[in-house]
Amino acid sequence: MGSAALEILGLVLCLVGWVGLILACGLPMWQVTAFLDHNIVTAQTTWKGLWMSCVVQSTGHMQCKVYDSVLALSTEVQAARALTVGAVLLALVALFVTLAGAQCTTCVAPGPAKARVALTGGALYALCGLLALVPLCWFANIVVREFYDPTVPMSQKYELGAALYIGWAASALLMCGGGLVCCGAWVCAGRPDFSFPVKYSAPRRPTASGDYDKKNYV
């Protein structure tokens, strides 16, 4: 029962991390305008993401514009797009593999093969977390480096956006959840008695008087 609980807990964490990764990929807040001069009252804030850029006015009005050309984007944005979308799609594949190998499903017959399928699903989830972590850290490194670069004008300096923090949290959940799924599958493969208990009852046999034997065997 302990291994099944680990698999379920790991799968829940992975699902939450998957949703967070999709949210981080779609939010246009990978970098936000930095306010360095407190004497200047700014009338707008600029957000930049992987798919669009937004301008938020001081009145609360927001205008967003999708990037016109993919090839005109910087290298880090193109790489972040590819890696993040790839991680999201790989997490979808990992979901089906994990569900097929989970002890609470009957897609695969119980046995060592079922544990190996669950182990593969957990490893894919951990790989998704690492794959998503690469563009997040790369993008954050570029933002921080340009922020402290004296040659970059003040008006072009940006800070880390909320999408990066959401992506880091999602990557951590994916790696932790994948690790828990792998642990549950490994425990189930080594200790079959840790899986869901299955009860067996023998068929009732007729007695000499025509009644059925009431004994059940578990």
Image: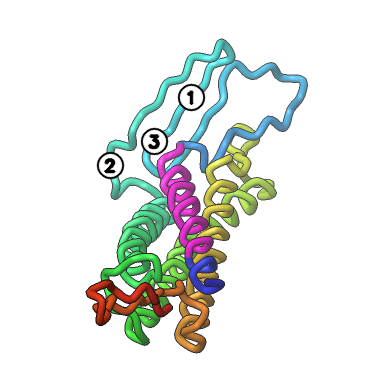
Q: Which residue has dot 1 on it?
A: 55
Which is the main secondary structure of the residues drawn in magenta?
A: helix
Marking on residue 52? 3
Give me the C-alpha separation between circle 1 and circle 3.
Answer: 10 Å
Q: Which residue has dot 2 on it?
A: 69
Q: Earlier in the sequence, mark 3 or mark 2?
A: 3
Residue at figure coordinates x 36%, y 28% from the top left: 65
- Residue 45 locus on image (x, y percent): 56, 25
**Front position in the image: 99 or 79:** 99
Q: Earlier in the sequence, mark 2 or mark 1?
A: 1
154 vs 56: above or below: below
Which residue extends farthest front?
209
- Residue 40 locus on image (x, y percent): 71, 19
Query: Looking at the rendering, which quadrant does residue 95 occupy?
Result: bottom left
Residue at figure coordinates x 44%, y 70% from the top left: 127
- Residue 118 locus on image (x, y percent): 39, 74
Q: Amino acid at mark 1?
A: Val
**Front position in the image: 149 or 71:** 71
209 vs 136: above or below: below
Residue 95 within the magenta-colored segment of the rendering: no
Give me the C-alpha separation between circle 3 and circle 2.
Answer: 11 Å
Q: Which residues are magenta?
A: 8-27
Crowd tier of the residue under label 1, counting other residues whose Cα lies within 10 Å: few below 14, some 14–19, many 20 or above: some
Give me the C-alpha separation between circle 2 and circle 1.
Answer: 19 Å
Q: Amino acid at mark 2?
A: Ser
35 relative to 97 in the view: left or right:
right
